Amino acid sequence: MSDVKLKNVVKTFDKGRIIAVDHIDLHVRDKEYLTLLGPSGCGKTTTLRMIAGLELPDEGEIFIGERRVSNLPPEYRDIGYVFQEYALFPHMDVWDNVTYGPRVKGWEEEKSDRIGREMLELVRLFERTDAFPSELSGGMRQRIALARALSSGAKLLLMDEPLGALDAKIRTALRYEIRKLVKDLQLTAIHVTHDQAEAMAISDRIAVMKKGKILQVGTPQELYLNPQHIFVANFVGESNFLEGYIADRADHKLTVELRGGIYVTSSNQNHKKGEKVVVAIRPEVLSIHKGKKSGINSIFGNIEAFRFEGNNVRYEIRLQNDDLLVVVRPALMTEWLDVGEKVTVAFPVEKSFVFSYPEKGLRTELALE
């Protein structure tokens, strides 16, 4: 079994003044591809380094399979580690880089050679065995780093921003290659990234982190369709946020009064009448119509900005109460509207989320740092 368990793990720096990881619990299942997702400085890389043994926890326990590894050095944890900056030996060619692990472990030459060939064929770079890292593209170097990490036969693969140094097209192609490789080899993988699109595309589950804490763990669909935290609603995908108060609760629906006496309805029920709340609405669930139209969750406003984004058209709508809504519509499936046009924006009752107003304020709750 190559599952990983973290129990009440804490890591601090600067004599306890900086809390990098704050009492987290996490279970990564055997053969699962899990991503630690969050903004820079949220503790995701520190968490990965503790699993690898490159950092030791101040409190809590870490298990790989049935073994407690909290204080074991990296060489006894049976892991493969892929760094963001590749960390290849510049004076070694591709072949020597990939077979370095088996040779250091003292494996027989025949076994080391066989594994080297298998790994290079897996990453489709067997024809470049004589090349040095400086002669390879960024994508090739990262695939060599992956092959080297796998050559030790480890069933647990740890990756720290493995695609962060690549350009967009290579990054998109390589992320699917890595996932396929992990699944073909039946590995357990933990992947650190701040890129939400990357995490959504490759993960079985995602753990969203902020300020050393894990806010929510779930499949990409669960996090997107049912965020349990206001930060998750904004970081996984994108959301509009409208502040208001619960005006009524009836028939499994909430009526929220926004600024300016505008009323909207949501199916979320976990709030009390009179409570201050935030209504979150995804830009892509909003419809937009010319002129003023009536109907449930229909709000009148003006188009303040328009941006063509290739597949989508992005509108910024200034509502009649002066709130701003972003609406995203497919470029090929909608009539384009001009800046200054008067429009009505609407959304289905079941497509909004209602959160209690954060104690420290909305802006602080959504901040990336």
Image: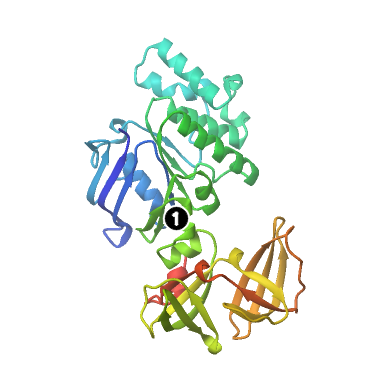
Q: Residue 93, image x and y in percent?
A: 54, 23
Q: How is the image coloured?
A: rainbow
In-image side of 335 versus 174 (left or right): right
Q: Farthest residue in the front direction? A: 251
Q: Residues within 10 Å of mark 1 (few under 14, many from 20)?
A: some
Residue 205 visible in the displayed image: yes
The residue that appears at 67% across and 80% down in the rendered structure is 293
Mark 1 element type: helix
Image-quadrant location for residue 48:
top left
Please state, as top left, top right, bottom left or bottom right, where the C terminus lies in the image.
bottom left
Residue 94 visible in the displayed image: no
In-image side of 153 versus 66 (left or right): right
Vertical order, 73 against 343 (above or below) = above
The type of residue carrying mark 1 is Glu
Q: Residue 164, image x and y in percent?
A: 54, 46
Q: Nearer the viewer, residue 30 or 171?
A: 30
Total number of numbered discs in the rendering: 1
Vertical order, 185 against 214 (above or below) = above
The residue that appears at 36% across and 44% down in the rendered structure is 49
What residue sits right under mark 1 in the picture? 222
Q: Farthest residue in the bottom direction? A: 261
Q: Nearer the viewer, residue 68 or 88?
A: 68
Please state, as top left, top right, bottom left or bottom right, where the N terminus lies in the image.
top left
In-image side of 301 versus 27 (left or right): right
Q: Nearer the viewer, residue 188 or 21?
A: 188
Q: Residue 8, image x and y in percent?
A: 24, 53
Q: Residue 205, image x and y in percent?
A: 42, 48
The residue that appears at 47% across and 29% down in the rendered structure is 184
Q: Farthest residue in the top direction? A: 110
